[in-house]
Image (spheres, helix red, strand yellow):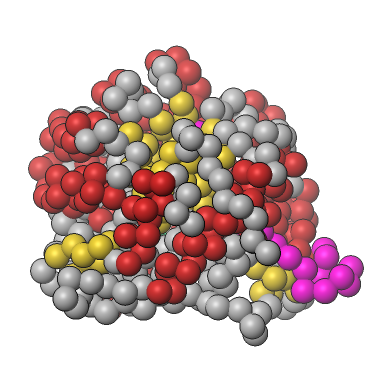
Amino acid sequence: MSKPIHFPPDFIWGSATSAYQIEGSPLADGAGPSIWQRFCAVPGNVRDGDNGDIACDHYNRYKEDVALMARLGLKAYRFSVSWSRILPQGRGAVNQAGLDFYGKLIDELLANGIEPMVTLYHWDLPAALDDRGGWLNPDIADWFTDYARILFQAFDGRVKSWATLNEPWVVTDGGYMHGTLAPGHRNLHEAALASHNLMRAHGSAVKAYREIGRHQIGIVVNIEPKYPASQSQEDLDATRRADAYMNRQYLDPIFLGTYPAELKQMFGDAWPDWPAADFDLIGQQLDFVGINYYTRSVVRNEPSNWPLKVAPVRQPQATYTETGWEVFPQGLTDTLTTFTQRYGSMPVYIMENGSAFYDPPNAENGRVHDPLRVDCLRKNMQALSNALAQGVDVRGYMVWSLLDNLEWSLGFAKRFGIVHVNFETQQRTLKDSAYLYADIVASNGACL
Ligand SMILES: N=[N+]=NCCCCNC(=O)[C@@H]1[C@H]2[C@H](O)[C@@H](O)[C@H](O)[C@@H](CO)[C@@H]12
């Protein structure tokens, strides 16, 4: 029996994207290359040889896309800034044309009554900084803070919501542990170092914001709740290891001043005893936490899978998305209640939630029917409402994504958008899920 659906009257409904996935024109108007420009250029790294050279051409079509957001009635739009548009070398000389692009986007949003929510870093590190070690170089905390200050000084006020990082776990696990994402490293020691430097950079930018900013700043983490495959001690321990590595690794140092003990146990000598001063920096007070929720994982012990020694267990009765993720809306409720239980009550935004299911490359008769995505959206709305009913302080929800876009190493084949993009013509078409989302926004969920 589903519970009544209710959202607070000031609940903020929006959508989310990221720079490299939608903008295109990565080197336009003085911008420098990012590590994703390089990563895509290496054959085999990205499915079908796809890249961000054009993507959704948002760099040129941003007014059309803001009009789409207004058509959907969105109250907010979460996007990221490309660091190498602002600082082509990652540090040093500012590229005014880069600032100008984001200033025009922000003004277009505000003119349409849409709150800009800016993510400073969504995976597209300037290539020039990677040449200096990137996230492996401790100096990156200062480089990132200098970049953040430029944006705070340019846009704070018009932008009232800032997030430092998007998903440090994915940056570390994909970019440095498994090499599936840029910059494509596979090294346990590097993964630990990159992860810690990401958190140092986060804390340093938050500290800088407190000196010059007047609004809200937080971080965005992906949380994938872990459930034991059995109640055996080995599976329960495996579940704790998986949760420590993917979830608690990023929130514990911010809110509890320490990393989960399981990390040292798993990483061994690849996990140093980090300086105590680092935790003072990392633990800066936040105004909100952004959570990206997509799926859960059922976990069993698997000694051969070094270093975590865990393995996922596929659920035979479940629906799985095109990215191989189980549709499990209860996990959204559990993620939110567990967050509050572990870290206390504070403002939370769902900064990403969505699903990739097969959509045709072209719309038919101006429509794109996406029943599986519609069903997912409905179920996630119920789950979100259930978390609110249990007292979780959720302030808003950003659907991932506004547009079909470059799904990183999966290319354009995996479509998350509620708006379909024909990548041959750049034609945008509202999917059925977009019409539903517009109704949800207009009725504040009462239509469900
Ligand atoms: N195994 N497994 N479990 C799920 C782990 C999810 C980690 N990936 C994300 O959350 C990425 C986030 C990213 O911000 C966005 O840029 C991506 O386009 C979406 C869709 O992929 C999501």
Residue sitting nearer the eye, 149 or 161: 161
Q: Nearer the viewer, residue 53 or 419?
A: 419
Which quadrant of the structure image shows residue 35? bottom left
Name above or below for residue 324 compared with residue 308: below
Asked whether, in this view, residue 182 is left or right of residue 101, the answer is right
Q: Where residue 175 sits in the image (x, y, percent)?
A: 46, 59
Which residue is painted at 32% across and 44% down in the image? 74
Q: Is residue 49 above or below residue 164?
A: below
Q: Residue furthest top?
A: 211
Q: Write down the region rendered in magenta.
A: 218-237
Seen in the image, is 396 located left or right of residue 302?
left
Asked whether, in this view, residue 50 is left or right of residue 445, the answer is left
In the rendered image, which quarter is residue 155 located in? top left
Q: Is residue 227 magenta?
A: yes
x, y (%) of residue 52? 23, 61
The residue depicted at 46 percent of the width and 33 percent of the height is 10
Q: Quadrant of residue 157?
A: top left
Quadrant in which the N terminus is drawn = bottom right
Q: Is residue 240 above or below residue 102?
A: below
Which residue is farthest right? 233
Residue at the spot 72% in from the left edge and 70% down from the top edge? 299
Front one among 167 and 425: 425
Percent of width and height locating residue 111 = 19, 31
Confirm whether residue 80 shows in the render.
no
Query: Magenta segment: does it hold 204?
Result: no
At x 70%, y 71%, the residue is 298
Q: Position of residue 386 (x, y in %)?
A: 64, 51
The answer to whether residue 258 is left or right of residue 44 is right
Residue 448 visible, this orientation: yes
Count of all numbered marks drawn on residues in the image: 0
